[in-house]
Amino acid sequence: MTEASRTLAQPGPALDYAITLPAGAWSLDLDLLPTFPLNGQTALRLAVSADGVAPVEVAASRKVGDKAWAEGVLDGRVRVASGVTVCGGKRTVRVAQLDPGVALDALVLRPAAGCPR
């Protein structure tokens, strides 16, 4: 029996990552292992938040014949933008399960335009 999907209001298990960033703004991406969704849907979903702000849903679409997915399989990872921007300093990033079977490989932080207010 496969575990049911969850919602942002009631996510599944979560991991908190304590990170320290240089000054400036940083865009957060997630690298996921390219697995098949176990919920019968076509996406791998997680919830992401930083410093206790409301979480956002992050989804990697998995469509048969999709070129980006095929490249992800060859690369051993699928990169997904979270839309979350984190400011420099000591921060906490929380990643929570929405769908079963999603495997997080890495948090990827890239320089961004500006810090949220």
Image (cartoon, helix red, strand yellow):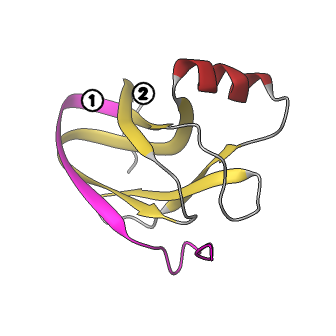
Residue 60 placement: quadrant: top right
In the rendered structure, find residue 24 and report the number of the disc placed on it.
1
What's the residue type where badge 1 is placed?
A: Gly
Residues packed near mark 1 inside 10 Å, few (<14), some (14 to 19) or many (20 plus): some
* 34 sits left or right of 41 in the view: left
As drawn, the residue found furthest toward the right would be 65
Amino acid of disc 2: Ala
User: Is residue 28 in the magenta section?
Assistant: no
The secondary structure type at the circle numbered 2 is: loop
**For residue 104, above or below residue 47:** above
Q: Position of residue 9 (x, y in %)?
A: 53, 79
Residue in front for this viewpoint, 38 or 93: 38
Q: Residue furthest front?
A: 1
Q: Which residues are magenta?
A: 1-26
Find out whether the residues at labels 1 and 2 contact each other: C-beta distance under 8 Å.
yes
Q: Position of residue 2 (x, y in %)?
A: 62, 72
Residue 105 lies, with reference to residue 45, above or below; the image says above
Point 65% across, 60% down: residue: 38
Q: What is the quadrant of residue 3 in the picture? A: bottom right
Q: Tell me which numbered mark, 1 or 2, is placed earlier along the sequence.
A: 1
Q: Residue at x 44, y 67 (%)?
A: 54
Residue 79 picture location, percent across and down: 54, 31
Residue 74, above or below 12: above
For the N terminus, the image quarter is bottom right
Closer to the camera, 29 or 51? 29
Q: Residues within 10 Å of mark 2 (few under 14, many from 20)?
A: some
Pointer 2: what residue? 112
Numbered mark located on residue 16 in the image: none
Kind of element beneath mark 1: strand
